[in-house]
Image: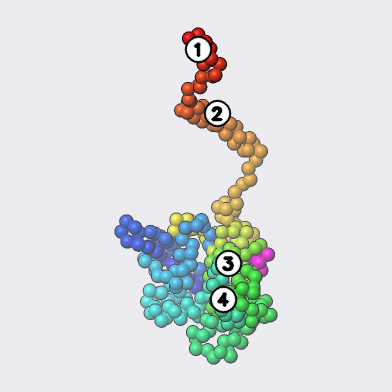
Amino acid sequence: MNNIIQLQDVSKLYGFGDATTVAVEDVSLQVRKGEFIAVMGPSGSGKSTLMNLIGLLDRPTEGMYMLQGRKVSRLSAWRRARYRRDCIGFVFQSFNLLATMTSLENVALPLAYKGMTQTRRLKQAGNALERVGLADREYYYPNQLSGGQMQRVAIARALVNNPEIIIADEPTGNLDSASSRVVLELLSDLHKSGHTILMVTHNPELTRYATRVVFMHDGTIVADQSSSIGTVPDIAKKMYLKPKKTEEDDLEGVSALMDAVPQKDEKSAKKTKKPKKKSKSSKKSRSKKS
């Protein structure tokens, strides 16, 4: 399969001089058409910045980015906007639905920038909502929907232009486990139908849906592993699934604590030792002698 995305030594810096922050550093990544890639890593590792660069929401400071065989640096602002509209669909953790618009109107919104008539826009948006199982929620406003339903509306909006690439940045971050499963099954169906999926996640269980896992740390890719659908790859287990403590570990911890606490108390007692107050009986005995 051909590479639909190709990054070569891409870096993204913010600020100047001593205040410069390196968000992404010398990242090289090739994404083949039809892959489902889970991007993992701790907070601040550069995952979202990398997705913004791939999604043409930001520009790299250094390096080369090729999208569908074209150098992104050579694209005009107008062409970048067109690629972003027609080739890439975005799904965000916070849904980003407009509260004053119905589900149908939210999904149809990207089509307005194509100059499509309102009738065609609404029809195409209705088909997208039907695809995510929300045909009966067309005229509901966001505040009338559950979190899972709002995310499915967001997915329908991402699909309405039939993009080749779907970027999902923590798509289940605000959802319960049942809603998360529905959203991941939808993304899995899109992957099976030929879409290329890039998903940022902190949950190792969600990597079961991916064909490849990329792990980031401090702005760089430190691991890149192919995966079989239905299994949690070794890299996700190693980085996220910590082994459970045994009874021996607990006992060792208690023993260490008991050894440490008395020493601390003795030191503090020496530091805070105050002279003893004289008792009333001693005072009386002195007065009698006098």
Mark 2 highlights which residue? 262
Label 2 crowd (10 A; few <14 / some 14-19 / many >=20): few
Disc number placed over residue 286 in the picture, else none? 1
Could you tell me residue 220's position as x and y percent? 45, 58
Q: Which contiguous range is marked in magenta?
A: 178-183
| Helix, strand or loop status at disc 3 | loop
Mark 4 highlights which residue? 99
Question: Foreground mark, 2 or 3?
Answer: 2
Q: Nearer the viewer, residue 139 or 113?
A: 139
**Residue 133, above or below 270:** below
| Helix, strand or loop status at disc 4 | loop
Mark 3 highlights which residue? 171
Instruction: State the CA–CA distance, disc 2 to disc 1.
Output: 39 Å
Q: Earlier in the sequence, mark 4 or mark 1?
A: 4
Residue at 51% across, 30% down: 264
Residue at 42% across, 81% down: 79
**Residue 40, above or below 60:** above
